[in-house]
Amino acid sequence: NFRPAARVSNIRVSPTTEAAQKARDLKAEGKDILNLTVGEPDFDTPEAIKAAAAEAMSAGQTKYTPVNGTPELRAAIRGDFARRLNIPATDAQVCVGGGAKQILFLALMATVEKGDEVIIPAPYWVSYPDMVIANEGTPVIVPCPEEVRFKLTPAALEAAITPQTRWLILNSPSNPTGVAYSADELRALGEVLARHPHVWVLCDEIYDRIWFAEFDAVSILTVCPELADRALVVNGVSKSHAMTGWRIGYGVGPVPLIAAINKLQSQMSSCPSSVSQAAAAAALSGDQGEVDTQVAVYRERRDLAVERLNAIPGLSCLTPDGAFYIYASCAGTLGKTTPSGRKIANDADFVLYLLEEAGVAAVHGAAYGLEPYFRISTATSAEVIDAACARIAEACARLS
Ligand code: PLP
């Protein structure tokens, strides 16, 4: 007689997780599957970071830490924000959680009431709408088409704001598109926000070190410091330092918001893992050479995938500014028929066709709120990307 609470029944299991699981299941059945669904680095955590964790364990750092993280990690986060983004922060403006995901969830939990609206530009990271719904808020999805590089324009933001708007969520570089906002674009959004002082901005910058664009990576807070009393900048080491399993993310924001997040954290998990915090502190303050090496590899893979996908009739994609995803249009395949006689009516059909007939696992665009597209992850070897693109090309050629 189990009865889940509405906050559970109203949300979905992450479609990315589901797609990844389906690929794993087929692989386990012995099928030859090239998996392009994975949203985590394929690199191992750099050795120096693992060594710092081992040292912390040997030194007895195996107990609860302060709710808002160890002083060493908070100092490393403040140093990173000051150095890379020119964002000054006091100690009380920093919170640390079990991944950026937890910080995002806690920020919404700490602020959103029933009926509050949260503006989410689409395509969006799959978790945002469900996190808002789980906290009884209303996601307001704003479609951002490819013509504007999948980015929120000032006019679209202005049109979406109502008296109920609590937050705008910005993700740059974006999962799933890899596009990033320039300083000028952020400034223009900041001008709209200046006219609506009740709207806060949640900036998810988890991919901002995996950066390929000509223009510099900037935070909205770097270019609009006047938003400091209503902006939460979220980041973490999962993607930048290949540390997804260590579960450390953090946020920098106004003191009352950070205090509210910490209060929730004190009742929820007490603190993130002490050993992981030592590792994250080492990641942020140590030599960044391995990050640069990994980014160079991601860039080569991006170039390879973009070139190969754009050469396939029926498909097309933009060149991402950062992150390790490509969001490709499959518009040219819609209405076509597969060799087994099935019609491709939407991107879910196309992705299913790729999985079943070509052995390539990707995620359909509808999961990210903008069709008809599919996302592939380039956090896998160039050989796999190359082979997958060849299979996709062959599968597209078999459509009639
Ligand atoms: N934000 C975005 C846009 C992501 O893609 C992810 C992970 O996929 C996260 C946040 C979560 O990162 P973390 O591992 O720090 O929880």
Image (cartoon, helix red, strand yellow):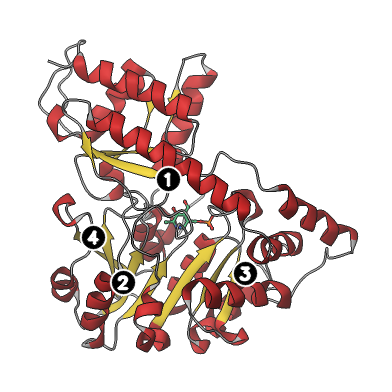
Q: In terms of depth relative to the viewer, which is nearer, 273 or 44?
A: 44
Looking at the picture, which amino acid does disc 3 mark?
Met
- Determine the CA span between mark 2 and mark 3: 37 Å
In this picture, is 161 found above or below 353? below
- Residue at 42% x, 47% y is 14
Which element is circle 4 on? loop
Label annotation for residue 268: 3
- Residue at 26% x, 73% y is 184
- Residue at 35% x, 79% y is 223
* Residue on which disc 4 sits: 151
Point out the tag, 2 or 3, that comes first from the N-terminus. Answer: 2
Horizontal side, residue 334 vs residue 197: left or right:
left
* Residue on which disc 1 sits: 324
- Which one is in front in this view, the residue at disc 3 or the one at disc 4? 4
Q: Are marks 3 and 4 in contact (CB under 8 Å)?
A: no
Point out the tag, 3 or 1, that comes first from the N-terminus. Answer: 3
Within 10 Å of disc 4 (Cα), the crowding (few <14, some 14-19, many 20+) is many
- Which one is in front in this view, the residue at disc 4 or the one at disc 2? 2
Q: In terms of depth relative to the viewer, which is nearer, 350 or 224?
A: 224
Looking at the picture, which amino acid does disc 2 mark?
Ala
Which element is circle 2 on? helix
Q: Are marks 3 and 1 in contact (CB under 8 Å)?
A: no
Specify the quadrant of the image occupied by residue 278: bottom right
- Determine the CA span between mark 3 and mark 1: 32 Å
Looking at the picture, which amino acid does disc 1 mark?
Phe
Q: In terms of depth relative to the viewer, which is nearer, 348 or 136?
A: 348
Number of callouts:
4
- Which one is in front in this view, the residue at disc 3 or the one at disc 1? 1
Q: Are marks 2 and 1 in contact (CB under 8 Å)?
A: no
Looking at the picture, which amino acid does disc 4 mark?
Lys
